[in-house]
Image (spheres, rainbow, N blue to C red):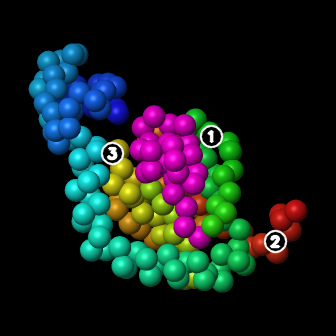
């Protein structure tokens, strides 16, 4: 995992096995000597999972609504990568609910600052939601860290060192081949 000293802002790789199953660990910055505490992402995920149970019914209804989504059948959705390792690429969104992350996500971006499963896009009949999935470094929209926000065509958001733009085009547009 990548950690950052709160004092000098230097970033370092930290071997997660050094947590030894503990939820938190104090580390000393090798650059400035500041001692700070970091949270074990594994135990953080376990806590986060227990809080997710209470909201899972709401999210399940959203997902069911998304799967019946007429808008998804009428429009083509994709992400344009503006900055980051895949800059210049267009990533198609092939289903109404897609996860974005570094690994094991529906859309994988090889950016070390992105969590394995970082955020998701939920396409509903009347709106598109961008939802952070308790990522380590956060999801940013309009330079604000978000947990969930409604986004529209050509809206930009940032995860890790990658900036993405949502593109919505009608399937019957002349651009469709």
Q: Earlier in the sequence, mark 2 or mark 3?
A: 3
- The spot of residue 68 in percent (x, y) is 60, 83
- The spot of residue 12 in percent (x, y) is 32, 25
- Nearer to us of marks 2 and 3 is 3
Quick check: can you spot residue 142? no
Residue designated by label 3: 136
**With 118 as the anchor, is 5 left or right in this view?**
left
- The spot of residue 24 in percent (x, y) is 16, 39
Between the C-alphas of marks 2 and 3, the distance is 38 Å
- Nearer to us of marks 3 and 1 is 3
- Give neighbour class at mark 1: few <14, some 14-19, many 20+ (Cα, 10 Å): few
Between the C-alphas of marks 1 and 2, the distance is 25 Å
Please state, as top left, top right, bottom left or bottom right, where the N terminus lies in the image.
top left
In this rendering, the answer to whether 87 lies above or below 149 is above
Residue designated by label 2: 173
Q: Earlier in the sequence, mark 3 or mark 1?
A: 1
**With 120 as the anchor, is 8 left or right in this view?**
left
The magenta region covers 96-118
Q: Residue at x 67, y 42 (%)?
A: 88
- Give neighbour class at mark 3: few <14, some 14-19, many 20+ (Cα, 10 Å): some
Query: Of residues 149 and 111, which is closer to you in this image?
Result: 111
Q: Residue at x 20, y 32 (%)?
A: 20
Query: Of residues 72 and 56, which is closer to you in this image?
Result: 56
- Element assignment for label 2: loop
Residue 114 belongs to the span the image colors magenta:
yes
Q: Residue at x 17, y 42 (%)?
A: 23
Overall secondary structure of the magenta section: loop
Residue designated by label 1: 87
């Amino acid at each position: 995992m990548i950690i950052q000293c709160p004092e000098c802002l230097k970033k370092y790789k930290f071997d997660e096995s050094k947590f030894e199953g503990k939820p938190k660990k104090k580390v000393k910055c090798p650059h400035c000597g500041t001692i700070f505490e970091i949270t074990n992402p594994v135990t953080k995920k376990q806590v986060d999972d227990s809080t997710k149970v209470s909201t899972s019914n709401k999210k399940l209804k959203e997902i069911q609504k998304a799967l019946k989504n007429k808008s998804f059948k009428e429009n083509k959705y994709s992400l344009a990568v503006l900055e980051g390792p895949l800059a210049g690429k267009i990533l198609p969104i092939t289903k109404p609910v897609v996860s974005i992350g570094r690994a094991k996500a529906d859309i994988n971006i090889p950016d070390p600052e992105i969590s394995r499963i970082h955020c998701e896009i939920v396409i509903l009949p009347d709106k598109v939601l961008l939802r952070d999935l308790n990522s380590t470094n956060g999801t940013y929209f309009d330079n604000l860290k978000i947990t969930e926000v409604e986004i529209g065509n050509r809206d930009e958001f940032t995860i890790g060192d990658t900036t993405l733009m949502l593109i919505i085009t009608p399937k019957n547009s002349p651009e469709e081949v």
